[in-house]
Image (cartoon, rainbow, N blue to C red):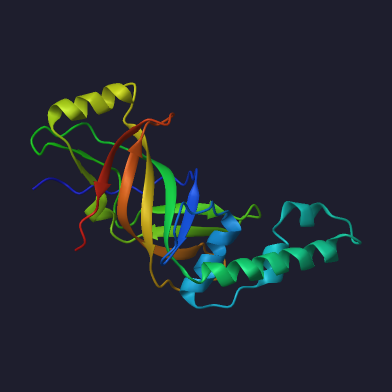
Amino acid sequence: MRRILSLAVAGIVLVVAWSPAFAAGPPPDLDAAEMFLLQYAYSNVPPDYKAMAEWNPDVRQADEFRRPRLIAAHVARLTAEMAVLRTTRVITVTTFVQLDPYDSQYGEYDLKLDNGSAVTFESGTGKQVQVALTNGDDANIWKLPPDEASAVLATNKGLHSVRLSLTLALLPSPPAAPNQPAILKARILRYDVYQNFGDVKLGSVVVPKR
C-alpha cells in the first residue's frame, strides 16, 4: 500500500467564492472578513461586528471625526452580508499545492494534501481563520494514465507546483479560542487543477465520499 502524504497546504489564497444552497449562476468573490463571518455562522457564535469593522484599512487610517461614521457604515455592511452568508453551504477556494513525482506503479500523482491541511486567511491585523480540510486524505490522489500525466507536466512547464480550485462543503465548526486561529471546517467535494502560473486547466478530480 502506498504511503499517505502529510504536509499542510501553503496559505496562499487567490480566489474565494460562495454559493447558497440553491444559488444560480457564478458566485461572487469573498474577502477575508466574509470568511470570518462564515466561521461565526458555522460555529454558532454572534459576530463582533464593531471589532471586525475596525480591521478595515480605511477605518484604521481615519481621524477621530470620520472614524465613527466609517465604523457604523462597515457594521451595517457586515450585518447585511452575514444575513446572506448564513445560507452559504458551498465555497470555492483557490490555493497552491505540490505534486509528488508521478507514481507509475499506481498510475497517479499524489498531492500534498491530508486531513491536517488548511488554507489560511488573514484579517490584515494579524487575526486568522483557517479553512480546515477534513478529508484531505481522500482527495490527495489524481489518477492519470502515463501519457496524460506526461502532458500535464509539459503543459505546466515541468513544474510540480499546481494551482487548485477547491469546491468545499462547509461543516459545523468549533468556536474560536483566544489567541488562536479561528477554524472553519470544510469537506472537499471536487477540485480543478490549473497551471502554477497561468489559466490553463490541467484536469479535474471528484473526491469520493467516505
How far across and down, in percent of the image, does residue 165 sit? Answer: 39, 45
Tell me: 195 left or right of 61. left
Q: Quadrant of the C terminus?
A: bottom left
How far across and down, in percent of the image, does residue 92 sit? Answer: 42, 52
Tell me: 123 left or right of 61. left
Q: Residue drawn 64% across and 69% down?
A: 80
Q: Nearer the viewer, residue 15 or 118?
A: 15
Residue 25 location, quadrant: bottom left
How far across and down, in percent of the image, does residue 2 sit? Answer: 12, 45
Q: Nearer the viewer, residue 6 or 204?
A: 204
How far across and down, in percent of the image, does residue 38 sit? Answer: 51, 66
Residue 158 location, quadrant: top left
Which residue is farthest front? Answer: 24
Q: Is residue 53 at least partly visible in the picture? A: yes
Q: Residue drawn 20% across and 25% down?
A: 150
Tell me: 1 left or right of 87. left
